Amino acid sequence: MTEKNLTKENRKLHEKLDPRYKKVYEDILIYIRVNTSSESHETEAALNTLLKKIIQTQREGGSITSVTGEDYRAYADSLIEKLPQRNILRLASFLALILVGLNLIFDYLIQIFFRLIDSAALSTTLVVIQFTLEMIITAALVIGFIYAIFHTFRQIAFKAWPAWKEYGLYFLIGFGFFLLYMFLNILLTSIDSGPSFEVNMFLIVLLGIILLALGILGFYRNK
């Protein structure tokens, strides 16, 4: 059976699950999706086998633990070991390129807009060290944030936490990275020495577009 057909069948089988079985399957599904490569025939085949086992157990009135055991996470990990692994750092790197590109595009387009209103020159002075460090730090923080989110998800998966506690933890992680970004950005503004040169802002926007395109291309090829 092709991957596309497996995906369709899995959706149909998913809808046949009773709520008590569906909740456990969906938790395992999300955990597997996060930890394995998407659009994988092996992953869809493993999910198909799991769904059929659960449905058979459902028909017989058995417990979901007869399929998965008491430790849902351990069972999910045993499935993941046989599947194509998701490279989180590579995925995060492409997302970092996307966000760095978007940051350059919007930042300098806004500056261009106001300079056009004021009939000011569209060139700016780039301090090479400051500009380079800003892109590196932004990319590093994005990679760190995504890795932290994935790692946190793995640690709290299958725990009976209320939604406010789970999303609150994600918020605190995001807020922490935001504060770190702001702090480092303030430090960067104090760097005004080193090589510098005049450059048209449209060239920086073009650089942002190139980084954005590379990030999107890499993301969809490696998701």
Image (spheres, helix red, strand yellow):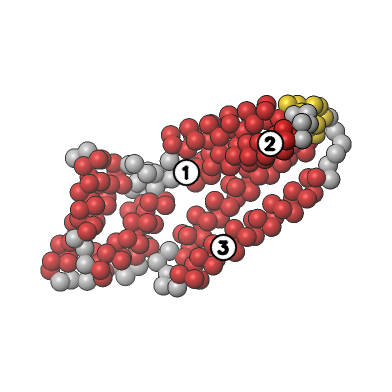
| SS at badge 2 | helix
The three-letter code of the residue at mark 2 reads Phe
Q: Amino acid at mark 1?
A: Asn
In x, y percent, where is residue 143? 58, 47
Find the distance from the CA under tag 3 to the CA under tag 1: 24 Å
Asked which secondary structure carries label 1, the reply is: loop
Looking at the image, residue 41 lies above or below residue 201: below
Residue at position x 78%, y 45% from top? 188
Asked whether residue 47 is in view, the answer is: yes
Q: Which residue is mark 2?
A: 113
Q: Residue at x 39, y 44 (%)?
A: 37
Amino acid type of the residue tagged 3 in the rendering: Phe
Q: Position of residue 102 (x, y in %)?
A: 59, 39
Placement of 61 over or under 4, stated as above or below: below
From the viewer's side, name the closer residue of 53 and 111: 111
For this view, does 213 lie left or right of residue 206? Answer: left
Along the line of sight, the residue nearer the viewer: 109 or 72: 109
Label 3 sits on residue: 171
Q: Is residue 200 above or below residue 183?
A: above
Q: Secondary structure at mark 3?
A: helix
Labels 3 and 2 touching (C-beta < 8 A): no
**Residue 87: assigned label:** 1
Q: Which quadrant of the rendered structure holds the C terminus?
A: top left
- Between 68 and 218, the residue placed more toward the observer is 218
Mark 2 and mark 1: Cα distance apart in space: 39 Å
